[in-house]
Image (spheres, helix red, strand yellow):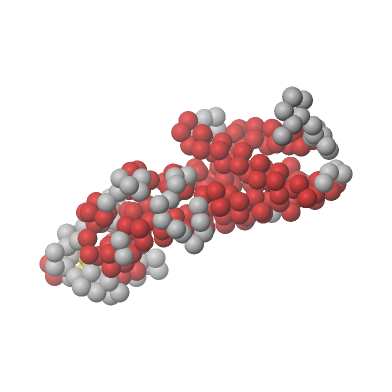
Amino acid sequence: MNGSNGDTADGHRPPSRAAAGQGVAARTGSGGAPARRGRGGRVRMTGKQRREQLLDIGRSVFAERGYDGTSVEEIAERAGVSKPVVYEHFGGKEGLYAVVVDREMQLLLDMVTGALTGGHSRELLEQAAFALMDYIDTSTDGFKILVRDSPVAQSTGTFASLISDIATQVEDILGLEFKARGFDARLAPMYSQMLVGMVALTGQWWLEVRKPQKAEVAAHLVNLAWHGLEGMERHPKLVGDRQN
């Protein structure tokens, strides 16, 4: 068995169409290269093809069952391989989970930062809200994984740290808006965390209910955030007795 050149046919069941992404991943790689056939006409994936298949299946199972509820046995069974193949590629469940999470976090960060193309400050806020809603809509399994606490360390950290990364992108925009309105720009990092956190939590709620429509949710998010900024006091004070 050689994980770098493909799996041997010995002891391996052929992957099902569902587990292999309707059979496409089993027959071609990301570049369209045909997979080899082993004895008896069985499809033999290259190491790269097998790794991508295991990532797709692992992502689906982790989203469905959570980290603790997922086993290497189930991932291997859905892929039509033996457990050692999973260990060859990822070193175990922890390694597979870490790669899945890192990919999703990078995808979400890229979508949000790429959406901030400029324009009026309110439009930028709309772009950020839509980017997160788009990610939830198109990568539902990935979002389900990200909002759970991770039992293993990833290079990009936890979902909370990802939200912090996105907030950093918003921070500069918000800082310019603060200066234009005569507010203390040093408070922009705190307010950017508040705004991005509000959108992220709303996204978690919308993931379950799926209504109203995405555009309407984004419009209401921006309505609350923008008009809150528009009428914001420069030096807010608490109205209750508690002061610390």
Q: Is residue 78 visible?
A: no
Position of 159 compared to 51: left or right?
Answer: right
The percent coordinates of residue 110 (x first, y second) are 57, 57
Q: Residue furthest top?
A: 240
The percent coordinates of residue 25 (x first, y second) are 32, 60
Q: Residue at 74% x, 42% y: name it.
A: 122
Q: Is residue 206 visible?
A: yes
Position of 20 compared to 157: left or right?
Answer: left
The percent coordinates of residue 143 (x first, y second) are 47, 46
Q: Residue at 34% x, 69% y: name it.
A: 48
Position of 137 compared to 173: left or right?
Answer: left
Q: Residue at 57% x, 45% y: name it.
A: 132
**Disc count in the image?**
0
Comparing 168 with 216, the one in front is: 168
Note whether 2 is above or below 238 in the view shown: below
Q: Residue at 24% x, 51% y: name it.
A: 74
The percent coordinates of residue 26 (x first, y second) are 28, 61
Q: Quadrant of the C terminus?
A: top right
Q: Quadrant of the N terminus?
A: bottom left
Comparing 173 with 53, the one in front is: 173
